[in-house]
Amino acid sequence: MTTYRKILVCLLIVLPLLLSWGSPPASGQSSPPENKVPARIETQAQRLMADLKKQGFEVSEGYFRLYTQDDCPDSYAAMGTCYFNNPAAPYVIYSVPPWSNEYVDPATQLAFGQNEPGYSTTFRFDPREAVVILGTLPPPAKYFGLQSYIYTRQGKYDTDSLPYRFFEAVQPNILSTFFGVVPENDKRVQIFASLSNSINNVVIEDQSGAAFNQERVFIITPDQFMNRTVRAALSVLSVEEKDILTEQIPGNLRIGLNKRSDDFVTFIRYSMPDVEADADQWRSDLPLRVFRIRDTRPGRKAEPYPPVKLDTRTAQNELYLQPDLINLIDAVSQKWGMPPCTDDECRDRAQWFLKPQLPPLDVIGPLCTPIGMNCLGDTEDTVYQGTGNLLFDEDTIYAVVGTLGTQTGNATYVGLGLNASMRKLGFANIPDTELAGTADAYAPQVENTDKFYLVYLARSCTGLEQLTQGSLCYEISEETLPPCDDLTNTVCDALKISIRDYIRPGTQRGPAAILKLHSMYITLHRP
């Protein structure tokens, strides 16, 4: 063979390999963006994928990104919601490529903002697959949690259910918040409901001894066989059992890849870091790897998990503080020129926040799902309270009062959220560090003021210094929340106030809602 012919043959062999090396994966998606993953984790990920492929499993890689307020316009355009996001703590989500036979709903492609071509944040589960996450957890903070959700479901919501009938009768202006279809696919309802108990920093610490700044592995799967398989492969890589945590997808969901199957999304919440600069660096790097693994070999049946059993929640009983809360409401209203009020009169003067996790609302994932109710990304790691839609103009001032969970022994951290109702957009979050001590000015008149917070919400706090008496007065500009003078108007944003108490100390979950006092608000007017 001449030298020329030898070169030609070599080129014919090597050229296709070179071309395939730089081409997109066979499924059609582009290569995923690279998160800044430590070399040790990258090596583990590559070895794990190689091992599982050698065993005959199909593997595809995804990537992590942030969901921030900048993604809200896409979310609102696609789904009519920004999920009442926490603006102080952007969520961490991953995007993955679909399997070759997986239905991809175009109606939800922008549900959480823009993805790289060929990737999606929402996906369907093959009955014999697992999502695997390897990486370095973030620096110390008050909270870290990973949780998967059913996102949408084929069918209709139940208009005879107790939650639907309650909102219809008592809070009709927020009925559509909890019951609605996918805007571009009215055969599916929005659910966004939790599936099980989350994997949070306390759960990780209790199992492995530490959470923050640690290398950990998460397996998310509906198949017990895949859980065992991935764990066995990790064992070969010397990953200890205590450092592997599995989120079980319950078998009573509609698992599958076809058009009628449920679709899912996974959220990571990371809030109140000890050092904000360190947290920002972690969020910038996102040192995490994610990939999907499935068993396509014929003949093996999936091994589904049983329905979830939620953890029991406990709380420090706050009911003994009820008289003090009423006295605080009376003292604040008198300060603003109202006459003294009896217990019943004070209760009528102030409006209670709703506790949506209690009957008849039951905004808890496994209870929302059967009736097609939107659980709004719920988690058992917190107690939610919230108002209905509130009008907010130049003369209206809201005094918001309630127990502060970090002071009553019921929370590791607390966030008072300010939200725009139509967009379901969280535009401000006031943490417990700013809420602490805000009722202290009333200590001569009210007992236990250290266990309460008092916040005023106004268009302008100028001229209110004597009335707010050293409490926190928070300004909400018209640029942030444009004027809206009609609660029945569906094209303008009213004000919604929420408060969240995360993780009761000494437990793995949020406090029991029934033992938490209702927060309340008083409607005041600029003198």
Image (cartoon, grey):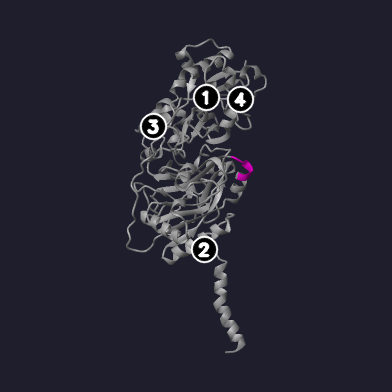
Circle nearer the N terminus (2, 4): 2
For the residue carrying disc 2, how many other residues have a C-alpha within 10 Å: few (<14), some (14-19), or many (20+)? some
For the residue carrying disc 1, how many other residues have a C-alpha within 10 Å: few (<14), some (14-19), or many (20+)? many
Of labels 1 and 2, the one closer to you: 1
| Label 3 – label 2 distance at C-alpha | 46 Å
Of labels 3 and 4, the one closer to you: 4
Determine the secondary structure under disc 3.
helix
Please tell me whether residue 277 belongs to the stretch shown in magenta: yes
Circle nearer the N terminus (3, 2): 2
Circle nearer the N terminus (3, 4): 3
Q: Position of residue 52 (x, y in %)?
A: 44, 63
User: In which quadrant of the rendered image does the N terminus lie?
Assistant: bottom right
Location of mark 3 (residue): 163
Residue at (42, 36) in percent of width and height: 179
Location of mark 1 (residue): 451
Q: Position of residue 214 (x, y in %)?
A: 53, 50
For the residue carrying disc 3, how many other residues have a C-alpha within 10 Å: few (<14), some (14-19), or many (20+)? many
Determine the secondary structure under disc 1.
helix
* Amino acid at circle 1: Lys
Q: Are marks 1 and 3 in contact (CB under 8 Å)?
A: no
Determine the secondary structure under disc 4.
strand
Please tell me whether residue 268 belongs to the stretch shown in magenta: no
* Amino acid at circle 3: Pro
Q: Nearer the viewer, residue 498 or 272?
A: 272
Q: Position of residue 307 (x, y in %)?
A: 34, 45
Looking at the rendering, the stretch of residues picked out in magenta corresponds to: 274-278
| Label 4 – label 1 distance at C-alpha | 15 Å
- Residue 502 seen in the current view: yes
Q: Are marks 2 and 4 in contact (CB under 8 Å)?
A: no
